[in-house]
Each structure stands twice: as C-alpha cells, then as structure tokens.
Amino acid sequence: MNKESVIFKILKNDKGGKIVLSILAVVVFVVSVCNLFVPSDSAFYISTFTVTILGKYLAFALLALALDLVWGYLGVLSLGHGAFFALGGYAWAMYLMRQIGDRGVYGNPDLPDFMVFMNLKELPWFWYGFDNPLFAFIMVMAVPAILAFVFGWFAFKSRVTGVYLSIITQALTYALMLAFFRNDMGFGGNNGLTDFKDILGFDLSSDSTRVGLLIITFLCLSAGYLLCRFIINSRLGRVVISIRDAESRVRFLGYKVAHYKVFIFVVSAILAAIAGALYVPQVGIINPGVFSPLFSIELVIWVAIGGRGTLYGAIIGAMVVSFASTYFTSALPEVWLYALGGLFVVVTLYLPKGIVGLISQLTSRKAA
Amino acid sequence: MKRLFAKAIVTSALLGGMLVHAADTIKVGVLHSLSGTMAISETTLKDTVLMLIDEQNKKGGILGKKLEPVVVDPASNWPLFAEKMRGLLTKDKVDVTFGCWTSVSRKSVLPVVEELNGLLFYPVQYEGEESSKNVFYTGASPNQQAIPAVDYLMNEMGVKRWVLAGTDYVYPRTTNKILEAYLKAKGVPASDIMINYTPFGHSDWQSIVSDIKKFGSTGAKTAVVSTINGDANVPFYKELGNQGISSSDIPVVAFSVGEEELSGLDTKPLVGHLAAWNYFQSAESDMNTKFIKTWKTFIKDDKRVTNDPMEATYIGFNLWVKAVEKAGTTNVDKVSDAIIGLSVPNLTGGTATMLKNHHITKPVLIGEIQENGQFETVWSTEKEVPGDAWSDFLPGSKDMISDWTKPVNCGTYNTVTKKCSGTN
Amino acid sequence: MNFLKILLLNLLFISFSIASNFQIDSSALSTKSFKEKEQVLENLLENYKEDEKLDVLLQNMLAGDLYFIKATNELVILETKEDNNYFVKNLITDESLSAMDKNELSKVKINNKLRGVIKSGLAKINLFSKKTDKRLKAAKNILANLELEDKELLAQALQSEKNSSVRDILLESDANLKAKFSAGTEQLEAVKLLGGFLSSKSLETLNYVVSNSESEELKEVANESLKEIENSKWFYSLIETAFFGLSQGSVLLLAAIGLAITFGVMKVINMAHGELIMIGAYTTYTIQQLMPNLIEYSIIIAIPAAFIVSGIVGILIERLVIRHLYGRPLETLLATFGVSLILQQLVRSIYSPLNQEVKTPSWMSGALEVNSSLFLTYNRLYIIIFGIVVFLSVLYVMKKTSLGLKVRAVSQNRPIARAMGIKSSYIDAATFGIGSGIAGVAGVALSQLTNVGPNLGQAYIVDSFMVVVFGGVGNLWGTLIAAFSLGEINKFIEPLAGAVLAKVIILVFIILFIQKKPRGLFPQKGRDAED
C-alpha cells in the first residue's frame, strides 16, 4: 500500500509518464504470456525473437532516460554517454564470461577463450572477483560512476560548458573505443566478449530466462524513471533546471553549481551503466563498437526525436527509432540510411519538441 | 494511449499469422552488410548470392521449388548481425543463410545459429580455431593461405627476414601467431621477425614504412607478410611506393587484398607485390570464364571484378544445392549429413570437397599484382589442400581436430585426452 | 676489289652470326619455367653486354611488353593493341608486323626474382648511359647488389664519370669492396671512409668486417665508423620524424580550417563536415574520370572544382537546414548528423559502395631523396606546402577583405553587426560556403593519401573537432598551431607507444588540457564568445 502511494505521489502530475509506463507494462505482460504460455503454432504466439528485441529496446530506453536527465534537465549535452553504457555492459559481460568456465572452446576452466588464444598464462588482475555476481554488479555501477565523477569534477569545476564539453565527451568515448579495440588490453579486443552460457545459474538460451530478463529490464526502466522523476520534482531538481536555464545567475545566488552538475552526471552514468548490463545478456555479445562516437550521437537523436526534457519522451524516442532501425534494415536494406537520415532532419526542423511535442500539439488542437 | 496497446496486439497477430505462410518456395537468407564500413566488401557477396539464386531458378530451382532470397542489412553492426540472424531463422524461417565477413560478425551469429539449429555458409578466409556444427567454412583457413605463402617466400624467393604486419584484430593476431611459430620451427631466429599491429583504418603509415625500410636494409632478403585489413592497404601501398620500396626490394604478400580492393587503387607502384588466395579472376578455366561472363551480365557492369570470397560463395552454394538434392529435403540436420564428402567443381579447374570438419579442399595460388589490377599466378599447389580448423602450430590447438561425423560428432575433439571440450 | 668483297662478306657473316646468336639465345626466353628464364638472362647478360638490343629486350620484358610468337618463338615487342588485335614489332629486325590475334602470341612472363635480375642487368648496362638519372639509378642498384665482379666495372665507370652524385655512389661502392675484400692499409683506409657514407650497404659491410676480421686495429676503426653512421642516422631519423609530424599536422590543418570557420562564426557543430571533405575527394575522382588524359593536371583542376562543389553543398545545407535552426546549436548537430547520413548514402548510390581509385600524378609520386636515410615523399611535401598556402589564403580573406571583416563582425557581436547594416544571413551562407569549400579542398589533398570511399569523412571528423577545440574556436592561428603540434606530438610518441596508444594519449591530453584552458589555446574574444 505504502509503495503504491509513493509511486502515485511521484507520478502525480506526470500524465505522460503514467501513460507510457502503463502501455509498456501491458506490452511486456502480453509478450511474456504469449511467448511462454501460448503454444508455438498458434496465431497468438510471440517469438523469442520479439522478446529479445523488446528487451533490447527497453535497455536503450533506460539509456535514453539517463541522457535526458543530463541533457534535458541539466542542459549538458553529453556526446559520449555510450561510454558509460559500454562500461556497464563490459563489467557485466566479464561476469558472464567467468560463468562459462570450462565450457569454452579451449576447455580452460579459468581463462576465457580469448585469453587462451592471446597466450595469457593467468587471469589479469582486473578480472579478479568477477565470478561473483554481486561484485560484478557493484562494478557495473562503480566504474562508470567513478569515471563520471572524475571527468565531471574536472570539467565542471573548470566551467567547461556548451560545445567544448560536448566535444570532449566525444573525445572520452573515442579514446576508450581505441583502447578497448586493442587486443592486448585484456578485454577481448575487436571480437569483444561473447559466447555466454548462463546468468546466475539460468541458461541464457531458454525462453523463460529471456522473458525473465525482459521483465527485469522493464522493472529497472520503471525504477529508473521513478528515480529521475523524483529527483526532478525535488528541490534539487529545481536547482538543476535553473542551472540549465541560467547558470551564471544560479552561481551568483550562491549555489555550488559544479556539485549539482557532478551529482546529476554521476547518477546519469550509473543509470546508463545499468542499461548496458541489461543489454548484454539479451544481445549475447559486447564489442568496442559500443564505444564508438557514432553510437553516442545516435542516442542523442533518440532523445531529440522523442522530445527532450520530458523523461517519457526519451523512452518514446528510443523505442521509435530502434523500431524504425530494425524495420528499415529488413524492409528497405538498400535505402535505410536515407530514411533514417531524413527522419532526423525532418524531426529536428519541424518537430523541435519531438514526438511528445507533436502529440501535445494534436491533443491541444483537439481540445481547442 | 490505446493505440500503442492495439499496435502491440496487431503486431503479435501479424507475427503469428506469418507462421501460416505458403511453403512453396525455399527461402535463402543473405546476411551481408549493405552499409557501414564493411559495405565495400560485403555488398558484392550479396549480389553474388542473388545471381546464384537466379541461375538456379532458371534451372528449375531445387526439388521442384523455386528459391527465394531474403536480404537483410546488418549494417556492419555486430550485435545487429545476431539480431538479423535470429529474425531470419524465426521470422522468415530461412532454410540456409549465406553471410558474414568479419570474424566478429560470425562470432556474434554463432550462438544464435547454434541455438536455433540454423545453417550458415561462411565464405571468407579466417583465422581458424573454430568449428561449429551449424557453420560450413568455405573460405581459407590459415593452412590454406598463410603457410603456403610463407613457404613460397622462403623457398622460391629466398626470404630470410620477415615483417608480419597486421591490423589489430583476431584474424591477423591468430595468423601471425601461427606464422611466428611456423617460422621459428623452420629455424628463423626471433631477431629476424618483426611484428607490428595498427588500428582499423590506419592511414598514416610514414613511420611504420620507414621502420620496415630500416629492418629490411641489412642485406638479407626481407619480405612483408601483410594481414592488414582491406581499407588500410591503400595508404600503406602508396607510402611504400613513395618511399622508394619496390616489390623487388621488399616484396609484400597480402592476405586481404583481392581484385576488389585493387580496383580502388592506383596499381602502377604495386606491380610485383603478391597476394595469396585460392582463386584469382585471371585463373584460366572454362568454369571461370562462364562465371565471369554471368557475373558481368548480372551486375550490368563490364568493369566489375570477381574475387576469392565470391568463388567461396559459389562453391558453398553449389555444395548446398547438391546436398539438398541428395538428402531430398532442406532439413538442416539431413543436409549437414549429406553434404560431407560431396564435391563440386571450383573455378580454377579443380574440385572442392566438403570435409568432416566442415572445411573444404582448396588449391593455393600465389599471384603478383599486374598493372591492370589483376593477379598473375606465379605459383600454385599441385593438388587441393584440405582445410585444417585447428592449427598444428599453436599449443592450444595442435591436439585438436574437428569431426562432425559419427562417432566423434564434435568440433573441438582433443585427440590426446580423447575428450570433446567445449559445448560443441 | 675481290679482297674487299671477301672482307665485307666475312664481316657481314660474322656480324650476322653474332646477331643470330643473340636471336637464338634470346628466343630461349619462350620457356615457361622461371628458373630457365633466369639462366637465359644471365647468359645474355654475360655475352651480349654491348648489344643495345639487350637493353631494349630487358626494358620491355620488365614493362610486360615482351611477347613471343607461339609458332616461331620469335621475340616481339608490343606497340599497341585493339581488343584482340595486337600490333607488334620484331625485336631483332625492328620491323613492324601486321596485326596479330591475341592467341597467336604469348607474353614472356616474369616474377619478382626475375625482376630483380633484370633490374641489376639493366643497371650494369646503364652505367654508361648518356642520361645522368639512368646512370644514377644504375649506380644505386649496383651498390645495393654489390659483388666482387663489379670491381672492374666500377673502375671503368669512375674513370669517365663526371657527375658528382653518381661519383659519390661509385666511390662508396668502391670503398665497400675494398673494405670487404682488400687487405692492409688499403682496407683500413676504406673502412675509415665508410663512416662517412650512410647507405645500408656500408652498414652491412662494416658489421661484416667487425665480426669477421682478426685485426684489432681494423675492428676498432670499423666500430668507430659504425658509430659515426649510427649518429648520422639518428640525426636524420629525427628530421624524418619531424617531417612526418609536419605532414600529419598539415592534413589535420586542412581538415580543420573549414570547421574552425563555421564553428567560430556560427557556433554550429557541423557533423556533415567529414562528408564535405569526402565530396571534395570524389570530385577529384570524377575529374580524373572525365579527363583521363589530363591526370597530371587533374589535381590542379580539382582544387577549385572541389571548392565550388563542396561550397555549394555547404550553402545548400545552410539554406535548407541550418538557417531554420538559428540559435539552437545543439539541434544543428542533430540535423547535420542526419544530413551526413544522407550524403554518405547518396555517394554510395551514385558511385558505388566500393572505394574508388584516385590516381597520383607523376609529379607527386616518389620522394626527394636527401640521402639514404632521409626520404621526403613528394605527395606529403606538396601537401604541407598546400596546407600552408590554403591557410594563408584564408587568413588573407579574413583579415584583409571586406567579406572577412563582415564575417568577423558577425562572429563577435551579431546584433550590433546587423545594426550596422550587415546582412547577417548572407554572411552566414557565405561563411558556411567558404568553410565547406575548404573542406572540399582538403578532400582533394586527402584523396592522394588515403582511401576514397563513402566512409572517408568519418575518419577525420573526430580529429578535426579535436584540433579546433584545442586551438580555440574561431581562431585561425590557434587552428594552425594546434594542428601542427598535435601532428608532431603524435608522430614522436608513435614509435614508443604504437599508433593506437599514441592517439589515446593525445585524446587524454586534450581532455586534460581543456580543463586548464576551457576555451582552447587562443580563446575567442568578444561578448558573443560566451557559450
């Protein structure tokens, strides 16, 4: 009872959030039921393919949410948020790799295949502890948080803003990408980490595990949403929004602007990292391509298309663009870049508030 | 608000409805990048498969049914490869897929194709160290490309010092490991071997070429064994030419440079450098002449070239067709059994046979680059070389074999411990 | 009378038999075996050195123009061909034959080893050629493949050689031989001399002397010479690395200047900047396709062409997309990203997803060989000069022309500039056009260095941004200094840490640097510069 009222209080004025989350809840429920409990030759069966795709989209939605927090509300355009996503993903993937044990190709119980292949004699120091899921989970959050803290501290203390900040976030993710591509770094290099067998004892290829992951992803997304909404609604949130709108003034009023910025940045990084950790077992592979500057820019597009500064807009944007991406690469493989590029241009020019803005325009016109 | 809900129901209904699709065509999946960094190499293979399907349909299809291609674009994005493969197998229900190029894409597709018991034909030369029940490897493994190339340099050209230059990813790393072990086994001292890795798309080769020059100026004949990935070869060769290194000074033998890569290059300064493949467009055989003619007509461009991965696709496709006809069905398990031991003609005048380890027999050709962007064969193996999945020169794999026939039925069988390691 | 006739007939007979011997011996080249061909060549080189026909034979064999008629084994040289009709002339008699079908002829194929044999053979013949550059090339070849038998040849050449650079090489070869094969003071003197030469041959000989001689004195002198060479080599390699750094810096400069302008004036993050570079490179390719006979001038023509093409595309982007997003720099980023995707796919559809071949004109190929340790490749040398020229032109336009004045005004304080009557929207279009045009010109330069494909732009966009941010937005000198310093730093770190780590270090360095100087090396002045 208590929990419900807390959720209700947080979402009190958030019509959009309520709508989006409830729709997603229904979809997830329907998909799970139709996959697990409906026989596979029925017309109502939903394939595991759809389950994993949906799970992937929801993970992306959480990532978009993290970016909206930092961009829509704090006004900091991070062009390197993919880095936190990737770090979270890698941390969890390392746990999954340790779980393979001796079922890898080379049959070595301690060393994952790529290490045997690279002639490593023993596990590098930074892999220790990753056979423990709790440790891995802590690392999923801790490593990106520390990076975000250090980076944010230096950047915001020196009052790096605007375009400069965006460019150096690009530099950050680009540098990490180059580093992780190196095969001697001990993270699998170009091939990345893959060939996972099970997670927390559950076989990754079974339908029930996949549905389970889908549901967990949805729950994390909802929790993340509630957390963000809570932060925004609080007093801290209002200071943050003021920083976005008039930073110098807020500073002159005596607030330690840098502290607020770092806090939001770190929270956002942690959310992004969790999204990464949810993404990895559902996709089955992680490779340094996720660090690429292009991927980080794509996430900005998701949030922009959905409608930034609304939180639920980010979720919508991520789902819509990912769906469009999957659709176009199957239906119109030759032309899909045109379609996607065109979509970006059109939405930015004519729909500055994104899909959310469009919907509110339409509904307000209906009302009027 | 209700819209999204309705959408979800409709989508799931549609997906369900797809199960009741007409089964009078045989669906063939094509999983090659049509955009992104790999589009350059992979679009050609997509077109090759389409051409082969076209030709087969002209002959009446297989088992009385026509072939229908299902083309998807994984956009050089590795996780997308896995997703598309899953879509091909569960949504489109393809009976076979021809696809992948980079090892990463293949590795990301592997768990999907094994989980859903699909069938993948992989046409590109690769590093070995893998053998899956559901994958047939028609590209060269290291013993069908790298080792014979090194033998040629050592024996025919008297090379004493070696530069192993590669792009930093699995294929060059593994190949160089194998070659290093091989060279040392042949008595080459470590000081005569220089190994160097560069990132993808590396374009500034000045310092590295300068180092190669220095390494090669001690008087002993030096050669470069290049596993540099396609794109980066352009500035590499340009720099070599500009710094005055000709093919008779320090020859370069490449494993990733084929006719298609040369078509984007000014080949004048490259004349005399080498490549090792199992097929060259200049190979003289009737099958090849026919193939080239069909290709040029199909693609409507007289200037397009053919290359080794295209031949590998051709061989894979024909082996699959033959296996389906032998098995009388497209069922994956039956076709996989039927295909072992089958032979089809290759394009260099010989035959390709499918072996128990899912590799084929291929001849090895060493060719020199000509000014017109073609290769002139200067040496070839007398007979086809059987592909070896597990290199005999690496300590981790020299005791392993792959044998998918009964009773072994294992891709990672250790002949010493007599155990099947891994989950294959 | 009779006597003369007999003499004449005899001479004729002798010359005929000599000629026919050459003909018989050389026709043995029709064999398929490379080893046999090697033997035939060696035989020819030994016995027919003086025959100028040998020179012709070898040149054509190297160029792939030597064929033999399958029926008669006669050697012929290919002059021209039309489809399957080949027009050849007989090697020995020099008479042109009527068109032959391709299948009647067979090429005298060579492989790498034969190529080496031919080149050395040609060198020995060309040592006495009338042309200096032929003699120079010949001398270098002899030095590289030095053998004791060359001693007489060298002595002969030294007697008649007047050109100083050829003499130097001949002297070096002579010294090498003496150091290796002579004895006593002659050897000692030679070993000492070798210290002043830089070629790898001298290095090799000295090492040989050190490891094989018994005399302590000789070893000492050899070691001294070795040290001398090592020092000079080290010095030259430093210069070489500096040159590499300059050249990489000039590439960065060209790629980044356009961005510095659009960034500085309009605060626009143009994600399509890389594609504008790519368009410039494709323009070069197209010009080469349209005018296949003017490859030598293609680059010169391409420069203004690329400027115009990329400039127009840039202005189109500005008018159609960016203008509507005035004041919203972050939205411009997104929109231009969409534009970059469209441009990439457009190029893929119009041309093909494959890389295209852009030929290098001959005046840009090869290198300036200062000495055997220092090669300054021409293409990079020209690009360095080109980069500086472009930079100075842009500087001139910005500082000395009225357009430049208006651009600077708008970038420093837009409202006041407009109040003074400057049509800021035209200036925006012009600025974007110029910035894009320069990107196109950068593409022309890059087409000579790297792949020309639809992904060309992606490779340079991050680097361009780094340079601009490091140097200070909107400041041209900042861009110059940033570009060259980043290039130099990268090249000096590379041999120590490898290419990838060098790049990573540079990126980390920039990230840290921005903390200290948030607006770059040379920050922009003016009220509008805030944000």
Image (cartoon, grey):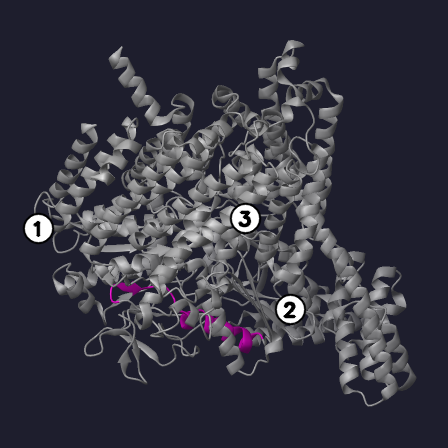
The residue pinned by badge 2 equals C116
The residue pinned by badge 3 equals A150
Instruction: Give percent across and percent down for residue C308.
Output: 59, 27
> Looking at the picture, which amino acid does disc 3 mark?
Val
Residue farthest right in this picture = C185
> Looking at the picture, which amino acid does disc 1 mark?
Pro
Labels 2 and 3 touching (C-beta < 8 A): no
- In the rendered structure, the answer to whether residue C159 lies left or right of residue A170 reads right
Q: Residues within 10 Å of mark 1 (few under 14, many from 20)?
A: few
Chain letter of the residue beneath label 1 in the structure image = A
Q: Name the secondary structure under disc 3.
A: helix
Instruction: Give percent across and percent down for residue B69.
Output: 24, 47
> Looking at the picture, which amino acid does disc 2 mark?
Gly
**Residue range highlighted in magenta:** B133-157
Asked if residue B146 can be seen in this view, the reply is: yes
Q: Name the secondary structure under disc 1.
A: loop
Labels 1 and 2 touching (C-beta < 8 A): no
Q: CA distance from mark 2 to mark 3?
A: 59 Å
Residue A39 - label: 1
Asked if residue B310 can be seen in this view, the reply is: no
Chain letter of the residue beneath label 2 in the structure image = C
Q: Residue at x 24, y 40 (%)?
A: A3
- In the rendered structure, the answer to whether residue C422 lies left or right of residue A61 reads right
Q: Are marks 1 and 2 on the same chain?
A: no
Chain letter of the residue beneath label 3 in the structure image = A
- Nearest the eye: C455 or C472: C472
Instruction: Count the marks.
Output: 3
Q: Is residue C79 magenta?
A: no
Q: CA distance from mark 1 to mark 2?
A: 73 Å
